[in-house]
Amino acid sequence: MVLLCNVPLAHGREFGTARGSSPTLVSPPVTLHFVTWKADHPQAWDEAIRRFEQAHPRIRVNREIAPHSSTAYHDLLTQKLKNRDVSLDLFFMDVIWPAEFAAAGWAFPLDEYFPQNEREKFLPATIASGVYRHHIYGVPSRIDSGMLYYRKDLLEKYGFSPPSTWNELVRQAEAVLEGERTTHPLLRGYSGQFKQYEGLVCGMLEFVGSHNGSFLTEDGRRSNLTAPESLLAVRFVREQIIQRLATPAALTYQEPESLAVFIQGKAVFHRNWPYAWGLANDPRHSKIVGKVGVTTLPRFSGGKSMSALGGWLYGISAYSQHPDEAWAFIEFMTSPALQKYFAIHASLAPSRLALYADPEVLHANPQYKDLLPVFRTARPRPRTPVYPIVSHILQRYFSRVLAFPKTDILEEAQEADRKINRFLALVRDARE
Amino acid sequence: MRENDAMTPSTRDHATGWLMIFPALTFVAVFSLYPAMDSFLLSLYSEFPGSERSFIGFGNYAELFRDPVAHQALIVTLGFVLLSTTLELLLGTGIALVIHERFKGRGWTRAAVLIPWAIPTVVAAQMWRFLLNDQYGAVNAILFGDQVDAYVPWLADPWMAFGAIVLADVWKTSSFAGLLILAGLQVIPDETYDAARIDGATAWQRFWHITFPLLKPALLTALLFRTIDAFRVFDLVFVMTQGGPGDATQVIQFYGYKTLFTEGRVGYGTTISVTVFVALAIFSLFYVRTVGSKLLQREPA
């Protein structure tokens, strides 16, 4: 079967003989309430849950589908948790939430269910994102990290290999656009996510990080946006990406809109998460099937390529009446078999390391072989219970300097620094 | 004894009176007074994820008055109120004058005019977002047709995004203003127009010297409703721009929503709501005291 049974008998309650064994021996059926988001590949999720219910005949999973957007999902979920909604059992946490959920007492600590030897089978960055103050609150369902998609056919035509620096990317894009001007007048150099929303923080982290910059200082105690490396990277995005390679419309793009531009054949380069691979190669959606390449994001000269860590962790509500059954669900969904299923049918990059050596997974996603180093080194966003506040300050800063070309980047960065420092200090004071 | 006798009926009247308004009072107390008081109390505390709730008196209010993001949101909101209400009253008057005339199909026209107002704001906002889309939006298709390279990303520019929100609101609520103004038009007796016509007044003179002055009460009512409503704008921004780009369309209610629901700063978010509530209450009181009382005095004449 799917997994070893490593579930401790938490709370002294009978977890029963579980797993497909005779349902007559165990307690009455349980319905788990799982608040999830609108998935990119809904059929894959229906099938996965069907398999779980088949393996666990006495557990039903009732899904409540929240919006696709991480922030809208967060608002709905935290509202339920603030109200101590006992009907809620399971949820996803974006990698930026565990600190907040743990500090607020919303997430059930999973230390007993999820022992160290099991955690070691996952990519370390994904496990780290679920840990807050020595306890673990989430199990990584997959890993997301930013990557560079490109038009293999166009780069080959002009004799380029995928760019390793941002300046090279700009040069290549301009050469391709110059050559294609008569045949593809609508072709753009770059398509990414620059709307004022959470995704902007991820995208900018990659630019700033690949120039040796960071949002917070190493100890995480102060904001570091006024560092010269960081300012230069932001200026590059404003002048080279927004004003030169992308369309101004990128300021309204989240992932789906920017992906649409790319798969309609209207962009040479595209930044997105792993899920875009499947859609870009799906003839029902894409005009560029078979013409897509994917690689690590470029860096600035002197810097290192940097991917923002994204992804979703399964969590159990602290108010759930059925933590054992909820854990059975999490264990099933994050098992090697199911992660493999999601990798093949939904292009979700596994959080389990061993699957990166699985021939079937690699056959469906040949790019994983080269991208494993990216997954290993993906950079988390600041880890703090006040992350939503920090994120809003960052979003305002980046969106302002990109949308208002005359703003003084240093001044805006100073203002953001001041505000972020204030909230970081408030949380420290509250703790000490 | 005699005193008591004299008192009894009046006491009983009082009791009956209280009894009769009791349901209404309970309703107001439970659904208006209690939430308002509770919000006010919440606004005296500091609370965010990772900290305990602590009493800070008027600290949140002090912060709000110093917060540049709140100031900007307030300016955006006031700009929105000014622009949208002005346009809606102008257009609404036009609509009312048209559908007040007798013509064939007037019933249908009246119904048709109200359609935008009947559509839920969230749906209307989503529709405008599609209409203004940079790739497949109908607005671009109508303006530029096949010249796809001329298509404008309307919501990407700070000023145009602001204009788009105003436009969506004007499209949606002008007819509501028109409806209120139409009610005002209908109480103007036809005889006054007949008399004016006999005196040789032109159409413009009839409008300016009869319609407009007699329409003032209706116009002011529409103004009050639209001002309060516009000040609370939220859904258009939430759906169309999420406050962006660069906070250019962040109105005060959306800022309050972000602090309260996303950031989890319960005290500060509530402070913003309470402040908006108090500002609107003062505005309404001022309005009723000055403009409203003048209107009431004039009515019998």
Image (cartoon, coloured by chain):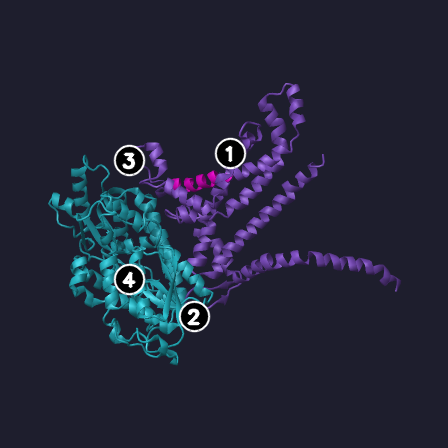
Q: Nearer the viewer, residue A299 or B200?
A: B200
Determine contact: label 2, label 3, CB under 8 Å: no
How packed mark 3 is, by other alpha carbons closer than 10 Å (few <14, some 14-19, many 20 or more), is: some
Q: Is residue B239 above or below residue A132?
A: above
Q: Amino acid at mark 3?
A: Val
Callout 3: residue from which chain? B
Where in the figure is residue A235, as x and y percent of width and height? 27, 48
- Residue ranking furthest to the bottom: A12
Residue bearing the label numbered 4: A380
Chain in purple, by letter, is B
| B278 in relation to B175, above or below | below
Please indicate whether residue A174 sits to the left or right of residue B301 in the image.
Answer: left
Residue A24: which quarter of the image? Answer: bottom left
Shown colour of chain A: cyan
Q: Could you give the CA–CA distance between mark 4 and mark 2, rounded to whole angstroms?
A: 28 Å
Pointer 3 residue: B148
Judging from the image, mark 4 belongs to the subunit labelled: A
Which one is in front, A232 or B29? B29
Q: Secondary structure at mark 3?
A: helix
